[in-house]
Amino acid sequence: MSLIEIRGLSFRYAGSEKPALSNINLDIEKGDFVLVVGPSGGGKSTLCRCINGLIPQFYEGEYSGKVVVDGYEAAKTPTYLLSQIVGMVFQNPQNQLFALSVEADVAFPLENLGLPRDEIISRIEEAMTMLNVQDLRDRSPFELSGGQQQRVAIASVLAMKPKILILDEPTSYLDPVSSLSLLNNIDEIRRKLGLTVLLVEHRVDLAAAKANRIVVIADGKLIFEGDHRKFFEEFDAHTFGVSTPKVTLLSRKLKARVKDWNMLCLSAEEFDQAVRRLVGRF
Ligand SMILES: Nc1ncnc2c1ncn2[C@@H]1O[C@H](COP(=O)(O)OP(=O)(O)O)[C@@H](O)[C@H]1O
Ligand SMILES: [Mg+2]
């Protein structure tokens, strides 16, 4: 059984004529790092809300199909329970921060769970250290940079010790340097904790090489699911509103023109290795 099983999922928001999702079937395994891409309005955020039960529990509309997360049916499982399995981080960290200090923000959901004090303290320390915000503990979340705020928001979600982390465009308010640093940090934490990660991200160039699978959603439909190298090889990503990493475009050109070049690279590191291999032959 997969960690997340989505079967025949369709959803239409109340008042909308068109479904936001149509007949989605998808399995996500433990330890997967899934990159979710597609044009704006395609249904990516709606899919995230269905996995953590916000849809249909807090959004009105027409829902059909089934989402099962770690054996729990998302539509029927109380959110206090599901939030300990699926942690969700949104685009704008300010929407998730509200306490007077960083530490209080990370502690808040744990206090709501009624955990023992010692357990709360050790979880706060662990989460703040993983996201490298321990030195900001007494600061007001609202005087931090966007990158720092997003780290605090992720720390407060990880303190719940979820099995799955969903990040819905977490770098939208961040500059490229902070974005890369955040995505590296997420990847490192994923490996360390054995987390399953779903990342909705339009900065494909920064995220592609980290993920092991890509899911492309456009117009409410699942267009592609599988190996991202295959996606960039077989599809013209632009037609789905997905940007192709520059090194991928370059390695595609080389593949067409240079004998012995057979690698479609997704990151600068892969490109570097491919060049070294090629040079090593002469
Ligand atoms: N809260 C909402 N109420 C009504 N319609 C919505 C709501 N959120 C999204 N939609 C609609 O659902 C469709 C999918 O949106 P969304 O899941 O936000 O796409 P994406 O995250 O890929 O940009 C769009 O047509 C959008 O206008
Ligand atoms: Mg969205």
Image (tube, rainbow, N blue to C red):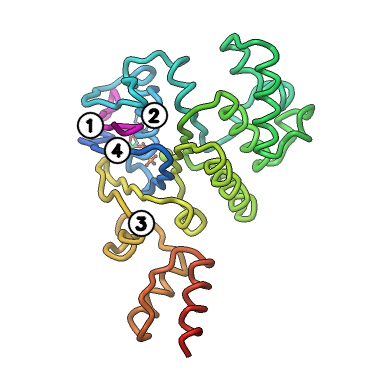
Amino acid identity at mark 1: Arg
Dot placed on the residue nearer the N-terminal end, 4 or 1: 1
Amino acid identity at mark 2: Arg
Dot placed on the residue nearer the N-terminal end, 2 or 3: 2
The spot of residue 150 in percent (x, y) is 61, 37
Dot placed on the residue nearer the N-terminal end, 2 or 1: 1
Q: Which residue is mark 3?
A: 228
Alpha carbon distance from label 2 to label 3: 23 Å
The answer as to whether callout 2 falls within 8 Å of ligand 1 is yes
Helix, strand or loop at mark 3: helix
Specify whether 65 is left or right of 200: left
Alpha carbon distance from label 2 to label 1: 15 Å
The crowding category of the residue bearing disc 4, from other C-alpha atoms within 10 Å (few below 14, some 14 to 19, many at least 20), is some
Helix, strand or loop at mark 2: helix
Q: Which residue is mark 1?
A: 7
Q: Within the displayed image, which quadrant is ligand 2 positioned in?
A: top left
Dot placed on the residue nearer the N-terminal end, 4 or 3: 4
The residue at 29%/23% (across/down) is 14
Q: Which residue is mark 4?
A: 27
Quadrant in which the N terminus is drawn: top left
| Magenta span | 1-18
Q: Does the residue at mark 4 contact the one at mark 2 (Cβ under 8 Å)?
A: no
